Amino acid sequence: MSNELARFSVAMPEDLLMRFDGFVARRGLAKNRSEVVRDLVREALIAEEAELPGTEVMGTLTIVFNHHSHDVQEKLHHIQHAHYTEVVSTTHVHLDEDNCLEVIILRGEATDVRDIADVILGTKGVKNGGLVVTTTGQMI
Ligand code: NI
């Protein structure tokens, strides 16, 4: 893989370019058009890579639940032990008297990480949450 910069020109509607320039400006003075385009391309390639079955991914799963609800805490604990090779770490925050937030860091094969996240998100008592998946971007 070569790190030499290659130049190419891009055609786009003027109004889209104006909006893009606003986006570049909001990213700060340290970024110019080319750097922001490179960031967006890397982001797209990592998102695509993270979808491929067999890819090693890292996921952060954030969930909110009421710890009084059924036996949700026991179920969540059980699921995480059942997948101890993929569950790297869990941070628990007591949001108020009833609600808890957990951030569960997962690492493993893309499909496995998504399946575990789906089981956790689908556990009765989990009110809301979401998974963010990324890779080390080694292919990029
Ligand atoms: Ni709690």
Image (cartoon, helix red, strand yellow):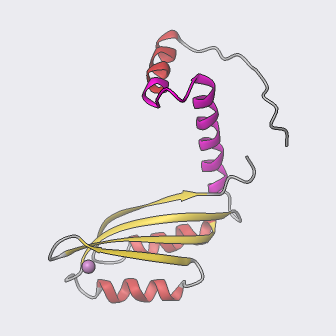
Residue at far front of view: 30
- Who's the residue at 31% across and 78% down the image? 124
Instruction: Report the image quarter containing ligand 1.
Output: bottom left
Is 96 rendered above or below residue 40?
below
Residue furthest to the left in view is 97
Task: Please state the horizontal and vertical placement of residue 79, each as a whole percent of the image.
Answer: 45, 84
Does the stretch in magenta take in 39?
Answer: yes
**What is the x, y in percent for residue 62?**
39, 65
Say left or right for 47 vs 1.
left
Name which quarter of the figure residue 110 lies in. Answer: bottom right
Where residue 135 sits, quadrant-wise, is bottom right
Number of marks: 0
Q: Horizontally, is 32 left or right of 74 in the view? A: right
Residue 36 in the image: state x and y as whole percent: 57, 30
The location of residue 39, given as percent across then percent down, is 60, 37
Q: Is residue 42 magenta?
A: yes
**Residue shown at 22% from the left, 70% from the top:** 95
Asked whether 33 or 77 is in front, the reply is: 33
Please give left or right for residue 135 compared with residue 120 in the image.
Answer: right
Check the image and report above or below for 86 versus 138: below
Magenta stretch, main secondary structure, is helix
Give the residue at x 30% y 83%.
72
> Does 78 appear above or below 125?
below
Q: Which residues are magenta?
A: 24-51
Q: Residue furthest top?
A: 14
**Screen quadrant of the N terminus:** top right
Q: Residue at x 49, y 77 (%)?
A: 89
